[in-house]
Image: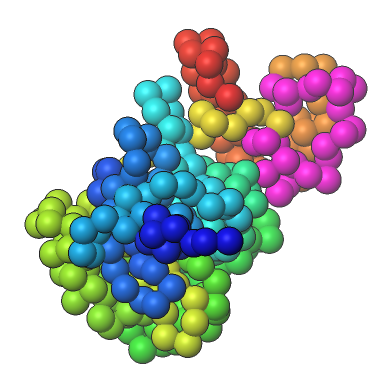
């Protein structure tokens, strides 16, 4: 069998930076290539393993996406947004200042469950948690069985780095959070050369300061990597249905399958085991209210757009 020049010019790579339709891919020899997706498809995300075709020096065309191990998404009525592919852990960061949205954290945890990705909740800036709101929120999640970690990147950088590095291990980790929670500070602790790498990505993408809103993947010393995403304020879950929501709520799980009706939505149906557990004190009313509000939001979105999954 004769190998063609076209076949020799193809190579596999991993997407390590993404901004819109512009990507940087790293081949198995560690070389970076500026890449664009063939055609007008917008289906490539950071963390993807892709098959590329060499173009000019240092440039390539992404021909196809190799099978994914995971895909974390957020979605609202306007659009779906894939955040990263092939990650083994989602690191959800929040902090006492600026004020955090506890439901943002809860939404991110539901998205991680739907993607089959292990979560880690990190409370940053513990030195600013004067009223204890951040610690109480973390304790509630720890009681539900979530992996948690409390750190202070600025007050105790060495300990923060050591604790995070020990927890992250050799996995591929995606870091998400609202703007201002200190994600960049944590990234710089874990990857001292992150700023230099970001400048290199920026130069190669030829997008200047716009790459501050790019997603970037950094290798960790000793194995594994971490993906930094731009901060955002809303975490839509329009891509999930009510069954997925219910099974992703740890406190619901022991009571599922005990409702009077098999298709119970756990809202106003008679004989609902979830609402009975809430009344009996086994489920926190605030968490149940979160589920009920999210269920109403998703059902409203589906009435407006039946094409949603």
Q: Is residue 245 magenta?
A: yes
Q: Residue at x 83, y 40 (%)?
A: 255
Q: Quadrant of the C terminus?
A: top right
Q: In the rendering, at what x and y percent does residue 61 appear? A: 32, 50
In the image, 62 versus 246, the foreground residue is: 62
Residue 109 x %, y %: 56, 50
Q: Say which residue appears at 43% left-offset and 73% top-offset.
A: 28
Give above or below for 142 relative to 116. below
Please name the predominant secondary structure of the magenta segment in the image.
loop
In terms of depth relative to the viewer, which is nearer, 220 or 284? 220
Pick the quarter of the image with the N terminus.
bottom right
Q: Which residues are magenta?
A: 244-267
Whether residue 25 is visible to the viewer of this picture, yes or no, is yes
The image's colouring method is rainbow
Q: Is residue 27 placed above or below 54 in the rendered structure?
A: below
Image-quadrant location for residue 58:
bottom left
**Location of residue 176 (image quadrant):** bottom left
Residue depicted at x 83% and y 45%: 254
Residue at horizontal 19 percent and vertical 76 percent from the top: 196
Q: Is residue 254 above or below residue 221?
A: above
Q: Could you tell me if residue 182 is visible in this image?
A: no
State whether residue 276 is above or below residue 160: above
Count the marks. Answer: 0
Q: Is residue 90 magenta?
A: no
Q: Position of residue 19 (x, y in %)?
A: 26, 49
Name of the residue lying farthest toward the left:
208
């Amino acid at each position: 069998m004769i190998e063609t020049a076209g076949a020799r010019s193809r190579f596999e790579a991993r997407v390590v930076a993404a901004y819109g339709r512009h990507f940087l891919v790293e081949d198995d020899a560690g070389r970076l290539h500026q890449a664009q997706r063939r055609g007008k498809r917008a289906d490539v995300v950071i963390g993807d393993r892709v098959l590329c075709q060499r173009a000019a020096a240092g440039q390539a065309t992404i021909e196809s996406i190799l099978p994914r191990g995971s895909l974390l998404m957020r979605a609202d009525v306007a659009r779906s947004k894939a955040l990263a592919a092939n990650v083994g852990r989602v690191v959800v960061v929040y902090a006492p200042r600026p004020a955090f949205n506890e439901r943002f954290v809860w939404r991110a945890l539901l998205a991680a469950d739907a993607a089959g990705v292990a979560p880690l909740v990190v409370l940053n800036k513990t030195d600013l948690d004067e009223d204890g709101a951040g610690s109480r929120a973390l304790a509630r999640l720890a009681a539900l069985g979530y992996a948690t970690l409390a750190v202070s990147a600025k007050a105790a950088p060495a300990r923060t780095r050591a604790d995070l590095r020990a927890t992250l291990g050799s996995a591929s980790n995606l870091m998400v959070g609202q703007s201002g929670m200190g994600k960049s500070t944590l990234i710089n602790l874990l990857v001292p050369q992150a700023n230099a790498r970001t400048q290199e990505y920026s130069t190669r993408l030829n997008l200047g300061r716009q790459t501050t809103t790019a997603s970037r993947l950094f290798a960790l010393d000793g194995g594994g990597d971490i993906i930094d995403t731009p901060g955002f304020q809303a975490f839509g879950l329009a891509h999930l249905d009510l069954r997925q929501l219910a099974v992703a709520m740890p406190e619901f799980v022991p009571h599922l399958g005990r409702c009077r009706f098999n298709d119970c939505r756990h809202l106003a149906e008679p004989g609902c085991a979830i609402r009975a557990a809430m009344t009996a004190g086994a489920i926190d009313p605030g968490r149940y209210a979160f589920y009920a509000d999210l269920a109403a939001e998703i059902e409203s979105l589906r009435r407006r757009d039946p094409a949603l999954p």
